[in-house]
Amino acid sequence: MTFARFERLLEHRMGLNAASIGASAIERAVRARLGTCKLENVDEYWNQIQRSPEELQELVEAVVVPETWFFRDPQAFAAMAHSVTKSWLPVRASGALRLLSLPCSTGEEPYTMAMALMDAGLSPNLFRIDAIDISGRALAHARRGIYGGNSFRGKDIAFRDRHFERLERGYRIGKSLRAPVRFAQGNLLDEDFLRGCELYDIVFCRNLLIYFDAATQSRAITVLKRLLSPQGMLFVGHSEASMMLSHDLAPAKLPMAFAFRKASAGLNQPKKEAAPARMAFQRTLTASGTAPQQSRPTSAFKREGPSPGPAPVLDELRGIADRGLLAEAARGCETYMRERGPTPDALLLLGLISDASGDLSAAAGYYRKALYLEPDHAEALGHLALLLSKQGDTSGAKVLNDRMRRLDKRRAG
């Protein structure tokens, strides 16, 4: 319980749901800062961050782990550029297109937005990108504009030759890309965040909401809607799309872009179904312990089919959970991820454990994190769909079940 107060403080400061990264990650960050400050015990460090906003920000920096690269999920940037050139540009009267990247991390996303628009033929003077993040360190990196090989992933990196200057170590962003991008420090959850600013035509807020609990997700989406112009588009992460439908946001119908508009923009929202579509796979027991119609009972925590990769440790932990030792299994999962890093299967198991314990908010967070790492993880999709259905969010469940059907068709074909 010693570290629970730090979890609550970080949740208040930045909306972080400890379950989304694991309590052990927060404990490690606190202990690291305690050592840096040369303090003897956790109580001394707690007193220091109460007195020092600067040290509280250092703790925030310690738990923020940027994981981004240029043209991550390229369909979103292609859809954005297509929509701008086909819909905004032809009817533009005056003024520049306004875009927001939040959180912008170390700059790869806003610079990618700029590259996509420039490659589509827009001059840099036709758009402005506000790039905002809570992390001062990430922003310093972004303003420097020098990137190593980890920021360039995938086979198609021809954009690097067009927009970057080769250095002895790394690549520097070109001047034409710097011009339309403005970096600033900010917190989406601050009461007056960007209040009174001109509305945005395009907002990218991807893979942030998965770190929040349900109440904070709702607060954040309300702010994002406030910042969006009447005909604007909001781009979110693929594991966050189902959250949008319960907030009066409608799909922009751009395949694999996970883009949404305000429902009042004239788009038809999908009809809610009385019950979610049947999943493409079946588990004999759900994490809540209810049994669908099947002939033989099996474990709620076992994977179906062969387990890919080295998973004997997770198989052991599933057995522990199946015996009802949920807290022990959860601790084992955290140890597993601390030693090997987060994996979709470990996050799925933590989701099942949370689900079985009745902590649906934590369960949803773990399922979304698993999908963040592996978008086509069938079991995570299925369990999140079941959870949303159980909570009455049939529209969100339908989105996930539709993804399941598409995935099933791809695999069958």
Image (cartoon, rainbow, N blue to C red):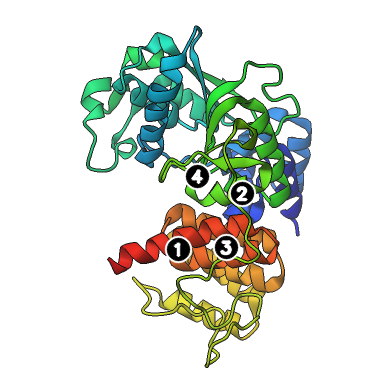
Q: Nearer the viewer, mark 1 or mark 3?
A: 1
Identify the residue at image location x=57%, y=51%.
Answer: 242
Label 1, label 4: how many angstroms apart (C-alpha)? 17 Å
Q: Nearer the viewer, mark 1 or mark 4?
A: 1
Cα gap from disc 3 to disc 4, whole angstroms: 15 Å
- Asked if disc 1 and disc 4 are in contact, CB closer than 8 Å, the reply is no
Percent coordinates x, y for residue 258 in the rendering: 48, 43
The CA distance from mark 1 to mark 2 is 17 Å
Residue type for callout 2: Met
Name the residue type under label 3: Leu
Distance CA(mark 2)–CA(mark 4)? 10 Å
**Tag 3 secondary structure:** helix
Q: Where is 161 relative to 352, above or below? A: above
Q: CA distance from mark 1 to mark 3?
A: 11 Å
Residue 274 x %, y %: 66, 64
Identify the residue under disc 4. Answer: 237
Asked if labels 3 and 1 touch by Cβ distance under 8 angstroms, the answer is no
| Numbered mark located on residue 384 in the image | 3
Q: Which mark is residue 243?
A: 2
